[in-house]
Each structure stands twice: as C-alpha cells, then as structure tokens.
Amino acid sequence: MNIPRWPLKFIQVILRGEYLEEIEGDLAEVFEEDLAFYGLRKARRRYALGAIQLVRLQLIKKARRPPKLLFLPLMRDLKLAYRSLLKFKGHTLINLIGLSLGLAMGAFTLQYVLEELSFDKFHRRGDRIFKVVTASTDGGMETNAWPVGDKLRSEFPEVEAVTYSTRATPTFQVERQGSYYERDFFFATGEFVDIFSFETVAGDAKEALTIANSMLITESMQDLYFKGEAIGRSIIMQDSIEYRIGAVIADPPVNTHLQFDGLISFATYEKLVGFSYSQGWGNFNIRNYLMLREGVQIDQVTSKAAGIYREHVGEWLDEMGVDFSVAFIPLEEVYLDSTFYNGMGPNGSRKRVNTLMIISAFLMLLACINYINLSTARSLHRAREVGIKKVHGSSRVALVSQFLIESLLLTSLSFLLAIGFVGLLLPFFNGLLGKEYTLLSFLNRPFLLGVAGLIPAVSLVAGGYPAWVISGFKPLTAVRGIAKSGRQGLTLRRALIAFQFFVSSGLVLATLLVIQQLAYMRMQDLGFDGEQVLVIDATNATGEVSSAVVKAQLLSITGVQQVSHTNALPGRPGWQGQWAYPERVSDEPVHTEYMAIDESYLSALGLELVAGRGFSEDRPAELKSGLILNETCVQAMGWSSPEEALGKEIVSPSQRPAGTVIGVVKDYHGLGLQSEIWPKAMDFDSDQFGRYYAVKFDKRRTIGVTEAVEDSWEMLYPNFPLQFSFLDQDFDRQYREEEQLAQVLGVFAAVIIIVSAIGLLGLISLVAASKTKEIGIRKTLGATIGDVVLLISRSFVLLVLIGNLLAAPFLWYFGNDWLNTFAHRVQIDPLLFIYALVVTAALAFLIVGYQVFHTARLNPVDALRDE
C-alpha cells in the first residue's frame, strides 16, 4: 500500500523552517490525536505516522537552528478544549448561557462606568483645575459670593487663573424668524477658555468673552441659526438685546459637566446687573473655577482660602448667625459629587456607579461559580482522561494549561453570545440609565481594553480552581476511573451554592425594599390636591401680556375652575435658603423657602388654612405686607402655635420674605418625601416673580381643557411654544432616582436568579446521574418517587435557607443605612425576608425536584445495571 501524500504536504505547510526551534518527544504522539480527529482509518493513520517520523528525522538533520514548535501545543489544547465542550453539550450550554449573561451585564456596566468616570478628563490641565464652592454647616452652595473669585485671583500667588460664570438662561431666549427659543447660555470671563480645553473653531474666543455685548457660540448653534459662517453676525436675545458673535467653539463633549450652547462676555453681565468684584458678599450666584500654577498642590491653598468669608465679613456672619468657608472640588469629581449640585450641566451619582459595579461583579462571580461547580462535579468523568495523559508524561502544569485554555475558549464564545444579548437589551438599558448607546458606542479604546482584561480574568477565576483540582488526580487511580472528589470538594460546592443564593436573595430583598419605600412615598398624603391641575411654564414667555390678562383668558375656558400665578409649585420649589428672623435679627436665622403667590394659590392647590386668612383684593394693605406661613415655619420661628404667629413680624436681610403674618397653612410636601418639609413663607408678589400658572380644571373635561389652553396660549404668546405638564405627574418625577434604582435592582436580581437557577440545574443533573444506583436501590427497597425527591432535594433547599439567613443581616444593616437618607421612610418589614425565602426556595425545589423526579422514574433494574 502506498503511503498517502497528503500527510507530507500537511506537515510541510505547518512545520516551515522559520517556525522551527526545537523538537522534543515523539512527534508522532503530538499528531496522533489530530489525525484521529480527522477520521482517518487505522491503516492510513499508521502509514501517515510513518511519514511523520521520516519528515521529523529529515527536519532534525537539516535544520540549521532548533525548530520552533511552541504554537503546536496551543493548537492541540484548543482542539482538545473544543472537543471537550462538544462532548458535554448540556453543561457547556449552561455555562455558555450563564457566562454570556454575566458578560452582557458586565459589558453594559463597564461602558456605563467608563463613561461616568471619564467626565472632564479631556482637559489638558485638568489636574490643576478646581471648582470653588461655599461650604457651611448645613452642606453649602455650589456658588460663591461675588468677591470670592477676585480674592483668590489677587491675593493667592499659587493661583494662576480664576474664571467667573453664571447662568444666563432661562431669562434669555434667542430670537429666530419671529420666534423665541430657550438655549443654555452662561456669562463667563475670558479666563474660561484659558482654563478649559474647549477647541476654538473660528475667531478669538478670549476676546469674545472680554468685550461687552459679545459672545461665542458652539458649532451646533452656528449650523442651526446661520447655516454658515457666524463670526461678525449678531443674535437678538430678550426681544431687543443684540450680541455680536466673536468666536465659534466645538460642541462640548458629552462627558463634561459644562454643557452650553454659547457663552456671553462677563462684561455684559457687569453692565446689566451692576456687578462688583469688591462688593456683594451676600450675593451667592457666581460660579468660580480656578487653575493652580504648575507644581502647586491644592493643600497649599485650602487652609489659607477657607477663612476668606470670616476674614472679610466675619462680623456680618456672626450677626446673621451663619458661617461660610471656601472649599475646592477637583474638576474630575464635580460631575459625580453628591454634596454640591452642578449648575452648569448634568449630575451623576457615584453611589449609582458603585452599586452597578458591585452588582455586576457579583453577577459575573456567580457565573464563574457555575463553571466551578459543574467542572468539579464533572471531574470524575474526566479522571481517566487525566490519568492517561499523566501516564504518557503530561505534567500538571501542562494539564492546568489545557483546562485554562478550555475555560478561555468557553469565555470567548460566551462573549460573542453576550454581544447578541447586548444588542437585544440595548433599548431597555438606554431607557433604564438615561443613555443613548448604540453598538458602535462600545467600540472605544477604554471599553475594548476593559474587555481584553475582563475575558482572561473571568477565564482564570472560573477555570483556575477546577484546573488545579482535576490536574491533581493520581495517575493510577485516575486511569482506572476511581478518582473521587472528596469531602473537601463537596463542601466547596455546597458553600458556593449557598453563596449564590445569598447574593440572589439579597438582591431580591433589596429590590423589594426599594419598591416598598417607593410605594410608601407615593401613597402618603402630600397635603395638597395635585389632581386635575395643569402647570404652564411661562418662564420664557416675555411680552406685554400681564398675568391678569392671562388668568382672565384661561378662566374663560369651559371646565377651568381656578387659575393661580406663582413662582413655586410642589415639585418646583421657590427661593430656598432665604434667611429670615422672627421680629428682629437674632442669633440663628431660619432658612426659609420664599414663595410669591396670588389670591387663588391656596384654593387652586387645595391648601388648608389652620389659622388666619389668605390674600384678598378686598384687603389691599395685606397684599403689600402680608405673609402666609406653613406650620413648620411657625415652629422654626419659635412660636408655640399658628394662632400665636398671627400678627407677628418677620424680617430678612434680602427683604424676601419680610412682613406681617396674616395666615398659616397646614404643612404640605413641596418636595418629594426624600426631603424634610421646608419652612415656607409666601407673600403677594406673583406679578414680579411669577413663573408658572396653575390651572385647576374639571376632570371630566381634560381633553377639551388642554386643547383650549393651547389655543389660548397661541393667541396670547404666538412666538413662544406652550410648555405644560400635570402637577401630579410633575411631582412624581422627583422619585425618578428611586424608580430607576428599583428597576436596576430588579433587572440584575432577575438575571442573577436565572444564572443561579441554570447553574443549580446543571449541578443537580450531575448529582442525580451519580446517584442512579442509589435511587435504584432505594426504589427496590420500597421508596416512592416522592421519597427520593424529598431526600435529595432537602439538602439543596437547606443551602438556599442558609443563603437567605446570611443575606438577612446584610439587608437589615445596609437597608436601614439607605432608608436613613430619606426624611420620611418605612420600617423594614420582616415579611420581606419571608417573601425572598419563599421565592428562592420554591425555585430551587422546582429545579431540583424536576431533575430528581426525572431520574427517579427510571426502572430500578436499569439503574442497578448502570456501570
């Protein structure tokens, strides 16, 4: 029989001279499994091996340098791993689904976390840039008094530059073709472009922020309003104010807390409001950012700058009974900072980032636990394979390498499946996290580097322990197929199952707790009637139309019962933090919420008067100096009852609020139940400060009223689009963060339960298969199927019980810690623990019971014959 030609060609292609470095051992043994894998008959395989030996001898003889065959063991191990995965299809599928779900959720989390942590890291001098804030005993403000920035700039040699900025909208709107549109504009000094790294596209950005009535705009604004070059052209704001465009800059990236459509020169602000860099210690409406000189650390400035307020206006602070100090926030931490609000763009949440990272880590860990459990439980089936390899000289390191490659192959395949899950769940997660991700969003360098590290890490965690255990079998016992996993391996598997259900039940408990707190907040009596109240946002509607005309027009609509004009509504607070004192300036001010209302406010919102009376046009003197307080404000002022407060005076350094108390309303929630009820003081001044119209209407005419309001608004303000909402829905938006948390926890809890369930399914199938003879003997001795199911199931259900018991104290501690952040909260209901236990135990019992029931139905005779 002729020797086949193809083995020679096969070897010549693979074993080229440039790859040869060393040849050790029997090359025939290396290729024997490969040739068998391709289905050669024994005879042909024998001649092929002979050809391999000839080629081997020729290569060794002729090689000028040691042949290089390092890649061959890797190819062999990959093939062996592939065949092993195919051999145990069921368990491979279980591991594949578990790992792919974990990796999919990990991919979402990785992308989200990387984006959240990337905010403002593109600025070239970001490590030297800090936001200046005003700290106080009650938290503080993200804005500063007017002179603070100037003091930092002029009196601190460590500081290279300081910029001033303040919001120009919503007071300013841009006019275009007779209509007005709200855009995000800020006043800023020229140092803004020196400190931050926003790219200038055209013009001189610094000069544009130096000259009065000059501004710079973004490329998007240029394209929207000019369809071409904007330099030198003008934009009309607030009906008549003209601003010349001196520069165009690139749109701010998504990952910056500074979001704007344009910047107006601060010289314009100085001219409009009479701004002073040396006066205005009581005007806290300026945002400052500073840039340190190179080599300077912020600690060198912090201690010196902290006392700026006390140094310049210490007596005034003592007189007001307050204390302020200057503090600094690193630029990269502004977005995620939870102490000081970001007034120039979006706000993130470090707590949400950390929560998602922890949950995702647990999820991937549980997927790895599935792999560990199934691999170690399946190890007995691979004992003979390990024994044969060890007899033929394979080292433990080589075996560990083979099993790790198998784990890496499975993890890589899982990641490919995870991509499909990501594409499928992308719309859902965008809505959940408020993002606009596409699959292309994941093709960025940080994410790809993260994945490049994540896949090997998961492979090592999942495959490391099983590889070490399986490779440790003794050759003689393993080759005879009598290797045993031992009590240690069984204990580990049980501990891992208990841990899985510890995490699962913990997330179920956390989800139930958040849902309970959310339901509690929504079911509480808010103290006002928010149903059938239409809120019109008239902030940007400027013109000659008075509030009296607007109210009269709205009241003429059939179905409208009340119309009120105000600067504050539930969910839309007034001026919070205004200092007020009872009758005279005392040691401690009352931080009040000032509200400007009209005579219809109380009736439109259904507020209850507990003392005195409301405003009325029949009593004009009270319209000028009268005040209406809430019960909390009465208590904060030190008066013992609402009746005692009537006729008392309130004074304020800012003259808001100030006057004589004429009425007291029952407390109501102006903000969500996360917050305490603020002391509220209302005066009759809606014509000056009013921003909203509250329209109370008949619920039977909802559609007709909304259509009529749109028509009336079009007639009154043809150039300003109508912006309206319903008060109850408006107020409910304050629970968006809790609602989002409940959804995130619910999704991850569901996925973790699925991963735990399929892992338990795979493990119990192996356990049931290993107990086939035992089940047969028990049935022969008279045990029923139910007896067998209960016998084997109870140990797994016990592990679920242990997991729940371990989760309970963690939930109790961290749950109470979370609930303590709410001013109004529920008490943790012990029934939550029972619900979580019932859900997880029932799931475990169904999975285990079904698999054991399926095995127990086999004929005992067949079971006893099983080898």
Image: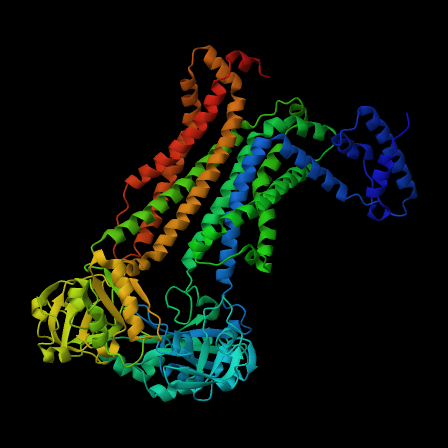
- Compared with 388, 540 (above or below) is below
Which one is nearer the viewer's eye here, 245 or 718?
A: 718
Say how the picture is coloured: rainbow
- The spot of residue 605 in percent (x, y) is 19, 63
Q: Exactly how many numbered labels are in the figure?
A: 0
Q: Residue 490, percent across and down? A: 51, 30
Q: In this view of the protein, which residue sits in the foreground, 196 or 476? A: 196
Q: Residue at x 55, y 76 (%)?
A: 199
Q: Is residue 391 left or right of residue 681?
A: right
Q: Is residue 754 above or below residue 569?
A: above
Q: Is residue 246 visible?
A: yes
23 up-or-down from 357: above or below: above
Residue found at x 50% / y 17%: 858
Q: Judge from the rendering whether residue 51 lies leftward or rightward of residue 333; answer left or right.
A: right
**Residue visible at 56% across and 73% down in the picture:** 124
Which quadrant holds the N terminus?
top right
Residue 346, image x and y in percent? 42, 66
Please identify the quarter of the rendering in which residue 610 is found: bottom left
The answer to whether any part of residue 538 appears in the image is no
Q: Position of residue 142 (x, y in %)?
A: 37, 72
